[in-house]
């Protein structure tokens, strides 16, 4: 009976663990744009600092990776941009919520990036699928 219970318990453990580990290991690239709040700009000019290490730590905590960090000179629409790798859009949104909650950003936006191979696959799919869609300019 003990052996039977051990086998059942092992099977349950494996059955519950497999879906949790079956997540895709594929990382997706995103361009993330940000705009600092005036209070964040003041704090950084009062205490100049390289924020790239803190940003990298934030993304690593969520299972992501920062590939590059850029800041834009001047008073533009955005103060900077990151190129990051994330496992999924939910993770990206969780990071956006975390940073937004600090009050240090007035805006952020995330754009999924595709490499040439992925974009060609999208073109191939667009060519092959016949959806019956009619463009507004083609209707009377």
Image: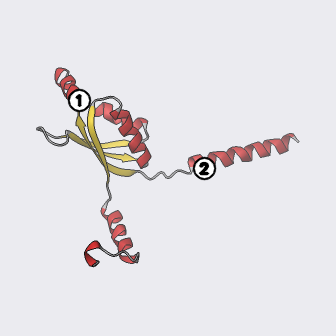
Name the outermost residue toward the top: 46
Q: Position of residue 126 (x, y in %)?
A: 36, 72
Q: Is residue 99 above or below residue 87?
A: above
| Contact (Cβ within 8 Å) of mark 1 with mark 2 | no
- The residue located at (33%, 28%) in the rendering is 102
Task: Judge from the rendering whether residue 67 lies leftward or rightward of residue 41; answer left or right.
Answer: right
Q: Label 2 crowding class (10 Å Cα cut-off): few <14, some 14-19, many 20+?
A: few
Q: How far apart are marks 1 and 2 (CA)?
A: 40 Å
Q: Position of residue 30 (x, y in %)?
A: 32, 49
In this rendering, does residue 57 appear at all?
Answer: no
Name the residue nearer the viewer: 57 or 133: 133
* Helix, strand or loop at mark 2: helix
Q: Position of residue 127 (x, y in %)?
A: 35, 76
Name the outermost residue toward the left: 74
Q: In which quarter of the image is residue 39?
A: top left
Q: Quadrant where the N terminus lies? A: top right
- Residue 19 badge: 2
Name the residue nearer the viewer: 129 or 113: 129
Q: Quadrant where the C terminus lies? A: bottom left
* Helix, strand or loop at mark 1: loop
Q: Quadrant of residue 131?
A: bottom left
- The residue located at (43%, 49%) in the rendering is 88
Name the residue nearer the viewer: 30 or 126: 126
- Residue 87 badge: none
Q: Position of residue 120 (x, y in %)?
A: 33, 68
Residue placed under numbered mark 1 in the picture: 50
Q: Label 1 crowding class (10 Å Cα cut-off): few <14, some 14-19, many 20+?
A: few
Q: Which circle's residue, 1 or 2, is located before the other in the chain?
A: 2
In this rendering, does residue 66 appear at all?
Answer: yes
């Amino acid at each position: 009976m003990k052996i039977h219970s051990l086998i059942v318990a092992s099977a349950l453990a494996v059955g519950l663990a497999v879906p949790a580990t079956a997540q895709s290991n594929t990382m997706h690239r995103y361009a993330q744009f940000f705009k600092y709040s005036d209070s964040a700009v003041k704090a950084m000019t009062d205490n100049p600092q390289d924020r790239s290490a803190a940003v990298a730590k934030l993304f690593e905590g969520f299972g992501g990776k920062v590939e590059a960090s850029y800041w834009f000179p001047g008073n533009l629409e955005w103060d900077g941009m990151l190129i990051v790798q994330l496992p999924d859009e939910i993770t990206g949104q969780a990071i956006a919520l975390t940073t937004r909650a600090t009050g240090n950003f007035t805006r952020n936006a995330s754009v999924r990036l595709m490499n040439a191979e992925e974009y060609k696959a999208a073109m191939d799919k667009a060519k092959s699928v016949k959806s019956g869609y009619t463009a507004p300019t083609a209707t009377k």
